[in-house]
Amino acid sequence: MRLNIWNQYNLEVQKKINFGFLKRTFFYISLLYFFIYFFKNIDQVSFAINIETNGINLFLSLLFCIFSIYFNAYAWKFIVIWFGKNSKNNNLVSFYVLTNVLKYVPGGIWHFVERFNFIKKISNAQLAFYSTLIEPYFMLCGAFLLASLGIIFSPLYLLFLLPLIFLNRKLIYIVLERLENLKVKASKSLNFENSKNQFERKINLNSFFPTSAFLLEIGFVLSKFIGFYICLNTFNTNDGLNIFYLLVIFSLSWSLGLIVPAAPSGVGIFEACILFFIGKNIPQHIIFVTLIYFRVISTSADLMLSFPFIIRRFLKKV
């Protein structure tokens, strides 16, 4: 009884708070901060690069961004299996990779829609909805675990381990309930009608903790970071960069880009957070150029792998 009252209270609070407005405001402030940074350093910013000298580094950065997409795809596959889908068909991986580019489409939900429809065809609507909805939470937990390495700087970083506590069979339903309330727009787009009885009947978690999926999400964030680190070393000639410090900052910044869906794939949010957290530990013009190149590289990786999907969609419209 008390739990139902508390849930009703939370719903009322969420209705009164305009989260959409807050997310958009944070997004615009981040973009403004990013452009202020650019104009303050415009006289030092140069995007010229020697391909003969730095081409290998840029290629390696692209390669690790590609690896990260496959880590993410395999993580999603194991999430679906954890939620009760017995088939281990690798079409899950290829379909995830092909539709990954849709996260850049305004609205930020169309990659979820495609994946929901795909899983729904081979399983049921409940498993499709919740396995698709929970995947960003897995990514967030993986990124927060890496961010918690900041405990070497402050014990407060241990707080980033709190979301990981709910990533188990006993408490995952609480997470799903909260995510469903926050993703009302996605629920409407998927035409999903929730039913608690259907949920309990159609979702059958295979183990207490989703070890494989979680480790793959950690691999996803680490691969992204390695791509970023290689890109940074391409432009930064100074030695003595603290790789753990950079990993913590990268994980935090990427997490904030994920949490604020007003930005497609965290565009603007991630960059502004990196600039803010790093401060003057790295020359401003160097980190700015690195962020631009890394965004182009990571987006190019998505476009390259999703090219067959884009062509197929284009031909259907012609």
Image: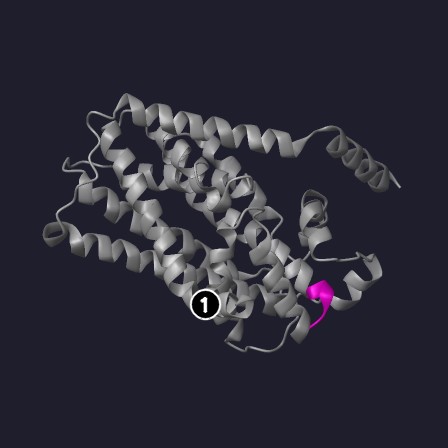
Q: Residue furthest right?
A: 1
Q: Is residue 60 above or below residue 274?
A: below
Can residue 173 be seen here? no
Task: Write the residue at 10% across / 54% down.
Answer: 52
* Percent coordinates x, y for residue 245 in the rendering: 32, 36
Q: Residue furthest left?
A: 52
Task: Write the residue at 48% across / 67% down.
Answer: 309
Q: Judge whether residue 171 is colored magenta.
A: no
Task: Write the residue at 40% across / 32% down.
Answer: 272
Q: Is residue 83 above or below residue 145?
A: below
Which residue is at the front of the view, 269 or 217? Answer: 269
Which residue is at the front of the view, 160 or 255? Answer: 255
Report the magenta residues as a range. Answer: 123-127
* Percent coordinates x, y for residue 212 in the rendering: 50, 64
In the figure, is residue 200 to the left or right of 289? right
* Percent coordinates x, y for residue 111 in the rendering: 56, 57
Q: Main secondary structure of the magenta part?
A: helix
Q: Is residue 187 above or below residue 78?
A: above
